[in-house]
Image (cartoon, helix red, strand yellow):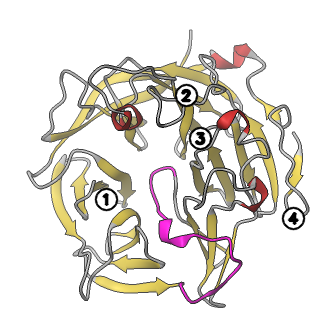
Amino acid sequence: MKRLFLTIITIVLFSCGQDSTNNDKQRVKVSLVATDKKLSFKIPNNIINNSACVLPYFTPDSSYLYYLSGLTNKICVFNIGSQKLIRIINLEQRGPDGVGWVNGFEVVNPDSIYVTSNYLTRLFLVNSKGKLISYIDYSNYKHDGLINPPDSRSLENMRMAFKDDKIYLPYYPPGIVNNPPKDTRFVAVVDTQKKVVNTLNVGFPENYWDNEHYPKWFGFFLYKNRFYINYMFSNIIRTSSDGNIWDDYIIKSKYAKIDNYIPFEKPGLSACFPRLVVDTYRNVFYRFFEFEQGNLKGRTKTDLMRWPQRFSIIILDDKLEIIGETVFPKDKYDMNGYFITDEGLYLSLSNPFNPDYNEDLLEFQLFKIKKSK
């Protein structure tokens, strides 16, 4: 493992850091096994079966699934136990309760929901009826010049975080692909007391743009007071307790490499790691791996990105050591739709290329971690 003192200089090599892939025996400890349990949530006609964000929320008495319907500014709230729709939160784009074009959210409690929106330097707080409670306008805050808050968001694997009285907002960096990596930042640190916005002291790996790995896509979350960053087109996962000193872990898929970048204008899609998520109940992490895809007849580039035909999930223990990797069948699941409960990992079956797909239902199948034989 190599400690990176990013306050001085960032030096990251793919050969450095702790490599969890050298011992192949680590991969056969556990796997994700499908159970017979499925959940089906019926959605109204005005709700699109293509979520921008799916998050569970738990109370002592019940459990709920919050579902942001793509391009509709509506959050559906389902009771997970009864599988019934109990509420639709209509979020106005304009007017007294306007929050813009919503791209993500974070549930503090059922009556306090933070909302992020495209192209707005504001963080909105709404209640269970979609009424605006308050907002934080940090457009006039003093800042360090590296932020791009209009593209901030909070999704399943790109979560806003709260630590030391500050709000951490991940955002997609602006600019062209040849920005120097040392100047690229992607998490805004909002201090509402001092009215200052800085950026978390971390960027992309030094050689991230080698082999034409251009997209600046990543995941971010806070768990047990540590920051975690997943680089979509890198084997590296980066973590830190203070946001200044970072540890790198090299996590590779057993089944393919990510060295062959396919430009967006060409057919097919590059292999990548689109998300890293934590399972707090079992104290493990899941790193999703998307296989390289060729040009499939009848599918657009967007189709390949949104519903990749083949993918796996790498299972990591609390020390980010690989303990298994499970490959999923083609065209059955939507790897972008999932949530985690005390039962296990629920993975979406709402894939339009699945022959059993029903556009009127949000369907999920339960997977459990099992020891491999």
Label 4 to label 1, Cα distance in Å? 46 Å
N-terminal of the pair, mark 3 or mark 4, is 4
Q: Quadrant of the C terminus?
A: top right
* Residue where numbered disc 3 is placed: 232
Which residue is painted at 36% across and 34% down in the image?
347
Q: Position of residue 298 (x, y in %)?
A: 26, 24
- Indicate the secondary structure of the residue bearing disc 3: loop
Instruction: Identify the residue at image location x=78%, y=20%.
Output: 22
Relative depth, front residue between 52 and 276: 52
Do tag 3 and tag 2 residues touch (Cβ < 8 Å)? Answer: no
**Magenta segment, which residues?**
139-157
First in sequence, mark 3 or 2: give its number: 3
119 horizontally vs 7: left or right: left
Query: First in sequence: mark 2 or mark 1?
Result: 1
Numbered label tally: 4
Gap between marks 4 and 2 measured at Cα: 32 Å
In this rendering, the label closer to the viewer, 3 or 1: 3
- Disc 2 target residue: 271
Disc 3 crowd rating (10 Å Cα; few below 14, some 14-19, many 20+) is many
User: On residue 61, which mark appears?
Assistant: 1
Principal secondary structure, stretch drawn in magenta = loop
Between the C-alphas of marks 2 and 1, the distance is: 42 Å
Secondary structure under badge 1?
A: loop
> In the rendered view, would you say 161 is above or below 99?
above
> Could one spot residue 287 in this view of the protein?
no
Q: Amino acid at mark 1?
A: Asp
